[in-house]
Image: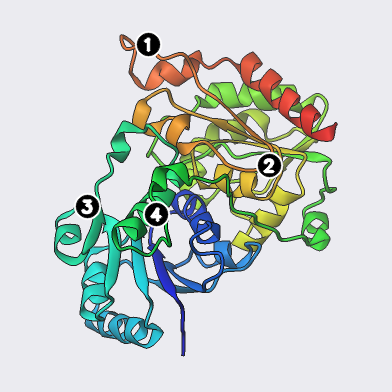
């Protein structure tokens, strides 16, 4: 039987989860037990986190059986409070039906107004703060309203610098793919269409510059095939290039990222995974506010991000082409060199 003082819920994508999990290390929860509800398939993240998190994976899709089981699970857990960072409507309903006395969540969709008794308004589209800070403020302001803060008077003044730490230190995985720890660079060019990406032509030029002095590993999923195809046509025969796209499971991916000399990726889940391993990580970001680095930059011990200058008269998809290859290359080298010293 699962027991926890607090139930924390974030049921969406990799980057969102990476930027939410560290809230359970904040001052208000550090002497308490927490349990996470996360999206199905995301379990590899809390499993490889340090410290490891306790979690339950749930599908976003509604079924009566899952709904009833979830209500029973929450009742047996008997948490003091639930914080919903993101979940479908039926999860919010399950929390309410389970009788949890403190239900914190962001007031946005219709069900949040019905089922959260300590709802908090946040205009995240304005991208004033980082996503992690939005998550931390949601928890702390909800607890402040529910009087669970033991004398805290202003939640906004209690922000901290916690970031997720991931590890999968398995040298055999690195050797399996003909790599040597800290002797290769990972480039992850693909992403979903949730933000603007760097043009393929720029990735090709950038990788060619790296290949003059480094071994480079390319990672990607089946969903990245269309984006990776031009790169493979242009670079496939290079001896220092290792194609790992569609060859890694989630644990192997974390290991490859952790043992790399550095990682370059656009605003996608991999950039957040890499940053969480402590590897020098450079993120490539759109200048559009809701997609930008203010809200979505990677968090970790050694990170940087670059963004093209924003021109309101040129806000088309071509705007990322204004981020020069030389700028990315030099910024990345400086980041890696700083970490070596």
Q: Which mark is residue 301?
A: 2
- Whether pointer 2 and pointer 1 mark residues with C-beta atoms closer than 8 Å, the reply is no
Residue at point 79% right, 40% down? 184
Q: Position of residue 176 (x, y in %)?
A: 79, 58
Report if residue 314 is visible in the image. Answer: yes
Task: Check the image and report above or below for 129 versus 246.
Answer: above
In the figure, residue 62 lies in which quadrant? bottom left
Q: Residues within 10 Å of mark 1 (few under 14, many from 20)?
A: few
In the figure, residue 101 lies in which quadrant? bottom left
The answer for how far apart the CA atoms under marks 3 and 1 are is 33 Å
The answer for how far apart the CA atoms under marks 4 and 3 are is 15 Å
| Secondary element at image label 1 | loop
Q: Residues within 10 Å of mark 3 (few under 14, many from 20)?
A: some
- Whether pointer 1 and pointer 4 mark residues with C-beta atoms closer than 8 Å, the reply is no
The residue pinned by badge 4 equals 140
The residue pinned by badge 3 equals 107
Residue at point 43% right, 30% down? 292
Q: Compare marks 3 and 1 and give the one earlier in the sequence.
A: 3
The answer for how far apart the CA atoms under marks 3 and 2 are is 33 Å
Q: Position of residue 161 (x, y in %)?
A: 57, 44
Q: Nearer the viewer, mark 2 or mark 4?
A: 4
212 to the left or right of 305: right
Nearer-the-camera pick, 122 or 339:
122
Q: Compare marks 4 and 3 and give the one earlier in the sequence.
A: 3
| Secondary element at image label 4 | helix
In the figure, residue 283 lies in which quadrant? top right
243 to the left or right of 111: right
Q: Residues within 10 Å of mark 2 (few under 14, many from 20)?
A: some
């Amino acid at each position: 039987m699962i027991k926890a003082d607090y139930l924390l819920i974030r049921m969406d994508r990799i980057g969102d989860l990476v930027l939410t999990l560290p809230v359970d290390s904040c001052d208000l929860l550090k002497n308490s037990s927490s349990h996470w509800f996360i999206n199905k398939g995301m379990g590899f993240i809390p499993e490889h986190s340090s410290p490891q998190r306790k979690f339950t994976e749930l599908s976003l899709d509604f079924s009566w059986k899952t709904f009833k089981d979830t209500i029973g699970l929450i009742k047996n857990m008997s948490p003091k409070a639930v914080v919903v960072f993101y979940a479908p409507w039926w999860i919010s309903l399950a929390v309410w039906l389970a009788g949890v006395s403190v239900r914190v969540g962001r007031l946005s969709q219709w069900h949040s107004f019905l089922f959260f008794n300590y709802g908090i308004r946040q205009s995240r589209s304005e991208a004033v703060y980082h996503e992690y800070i939005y998550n931390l403020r949601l928890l702390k302001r909800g607890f402040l309203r529910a009087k669970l803060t033991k004398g805290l008077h202003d939640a906004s003044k209690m922000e901290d610098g916690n970031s997720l730490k991931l590890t999968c230190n398995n040298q055999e995985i690195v050797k399996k793919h003909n790599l040597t720890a800290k002797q290769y660079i990972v480039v992850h060019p693909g992403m979903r269409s949730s933000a603007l990406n760097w043009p393929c032509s720029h990735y090709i030029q950038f990788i060619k510059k790296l290949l003059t002095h480094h071994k480079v590993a390319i990672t990607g999923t089946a969903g990245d095939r269309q984006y990776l195809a031009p790169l493979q046509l242009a670079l496939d025969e290079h001896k220092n290039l290792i194609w790992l796209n569609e060859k890694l499971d989630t644990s192997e991916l974390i290991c490859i990222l952790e043992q790399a000399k550095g990682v370059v990726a656009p605003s996608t889940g991999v950039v957040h995974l890499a940053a969480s391993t402590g590897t020098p990580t450079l993120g490539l970001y759109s200048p559009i506010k809701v997609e930008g680095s203010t809200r979505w930059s990677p968090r970790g011990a050694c990170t940087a991000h670059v963004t093209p200058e924003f021109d309101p008269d040129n806000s088309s998809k071509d705007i990322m082409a204004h981020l020069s290859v030389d700028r990315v290359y030099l910024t990345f080298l400086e980041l890696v060199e700083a970490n070596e010293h």
